[in-house]
Amino acid sequence: MILPVTLTIAAAAAVINLWLAFRIVPRRIKGGPLTGDGGEPRMMARMRAHANFVEYAPFVLILMALIELAGGRATWLWIVGVVFVVARVLHGFGMDATKPNPLRAAGALVTWLVLAVLAGWALVIAQGGGTGRPTRIIPFDFTEPRG
């Protein structure tokens, strides 16, 4: 099964990942530290922007794919996916600032919101909500097995 929404957002995420990585390389080539940040604030900020993206993108993409597979509405997935992409670009630019920047904060907050919305949506689907199937909650049994 092809997942057009998730595939498109994943492709956009790959481009953002490359952009964030390539912002670090010129500083390394120009005599900057070959590993680590060398104590340079801008290098540290760019490395954190890249690492932060890598920390959040997989969760968003996995949830999007699973929701799309489960029949989640494509229109809402497109909206959530595009909002995530914009938020991550804003965050990347915001991390370049030498002082607190509203782009960084906006990018982070919107990313958290996207992740929370997707997690909630996934839980609703997992419990049978919105799929036309009856809700079937599987209880956890924490008691010792009898035997």
Image (cartoon, grey):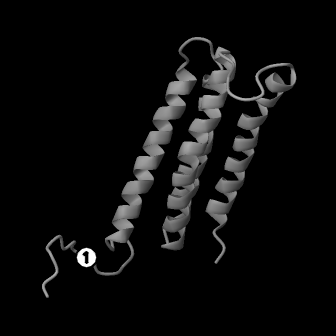
Q: Is residue 12 left or right of residue 110?
A: right
Q: Point out residue 87 in the picture as x, y percentages from the top left corner.
A: 57, 37
In the image, 127 versus 56, the foreground residue is: 56
Q: Residue furthest bottom?
A: 147
**Residue 135 occupies which quadrant of the picture?**
bottom left
Percent of width and height locating residue 91: 59, 31
Question: Residue at left 22%, top 71%?
Answer: 140
Please count the marks in the image.
1
Nearest to the observer: residue 89 or residue 19: 19
- The one of 127 and 37 positioned closer to us in this rendering: 37
Q: Quadrant of the C terminus?
A: bottom left
Judge the density around disc 1: few (<14), some (14-19), many (≥20) Cα neighbours within 10 Å: few
Query: Which element carries disc 1, helix, strand or loop?
Result: loop
* Residue 131 at x, y percent in the picture: 39, 75
Residue 83 seen in this snapshot: no
Q: Is residue 49 left or right of residue 22?
A: left
Horizontally, is 77 left or right of 14 in the view? left
Reading the image, the residue beneath label 1 is 138
Query: As displayed, is residue 32 above or below residue 56?
Result: above
